[in-house]
Image (cartoon, helix red, strand yellow):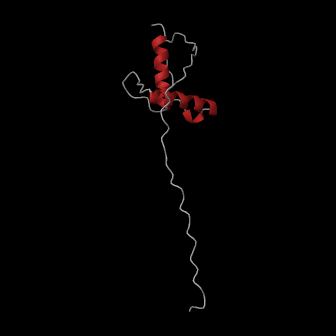
Amino acid sequence: MPRFKQQQEPEKASPPEQTTQRPESPTVHTTVAVQIPTRPVPPSCYFAQHVEVNRLTHSQRTALRSVSDALLFSHSRTANGKEVRCGADTIRWILEKVAEQMPK
């Protein structure tokens, strides 16, 4: 008979299975109406073609993400047929909608 009784190691509890589920696309979107002032622009006007989205405030980033997600889930496209998939596409889509409503 052995002098020391061999102890069994307690079984380690296995971590619970983690399931990552993609959030379902929202079925109800809210819409907002915004009045955007515009004015005539001379045809030869120069305007920078860059928006620094990394300098947006928290509320601006949240709004951009909200609009981007809604446009992505609704399979919206820009005028050239590209699906809206990122912040730059979202800004482009918004400006196209403004341009459509401007007097010619």
Residue at the limit of the structure toward the left, as seen here: 81
Q: Name the residue rendered at 48%, 43% in the picture.
A: 21
| In this picture, residue 69 sits left or right of residue 10 | left
Where residue 70 appears, as percent x and y from the top left, is 49, 28
Q: Identify the image quadrant of residue 54.
A: top right
Q: Name the residue rendered at 48%, 30% in the picture.
A: 88
Residue at the limit of the structure toward the right, as seen here: 58
Where residue 83 appears, as percent x and y from the top left, is 40, 29
Residue 43 visible in this rendered orientation of the protein: no
Residue at the limit of the structure toward the top, as seen here: 103
Q: Nearer the viewer, residue 98 or 34?
A: 34
| In this picture, residue 42 sits left or right of residue 80 | right
Q: Name the residue rendered at 38%, 28% in the picture.
A: 82
Above or below, comparing residue 44 to residue 88 in the picture: above
Above or below, comparing residue 98 to residue 70 in the picture: above
Residue 26 visible in this rendered orientation of the protein: yes
Above or below, comparing residue 95 to residue 73 in the picture: above
Q: Nearer the viewer, residue 39 or 28?
A: 28
Q: Nearer the viewer, residue 2 or 48?
A: 2
* The N terminus - image quarter: bottom right
Where residue 104 appears, as percent x and y from the top left, is 45, 7
Q: Nearer the viewer, residue 2 or 34?
A: 2
Q: Name the residue rendered at 57%, 19% in the picture.
A: 32
Where residue 14 appears, as percent x and y from the top left, is 53, 62
Q: Identify the image quadrant of residue 34.
A: top right
Residue at the limit of the structure toward the front, as seen here: 1
The total of numbered circles placed on residues is 0
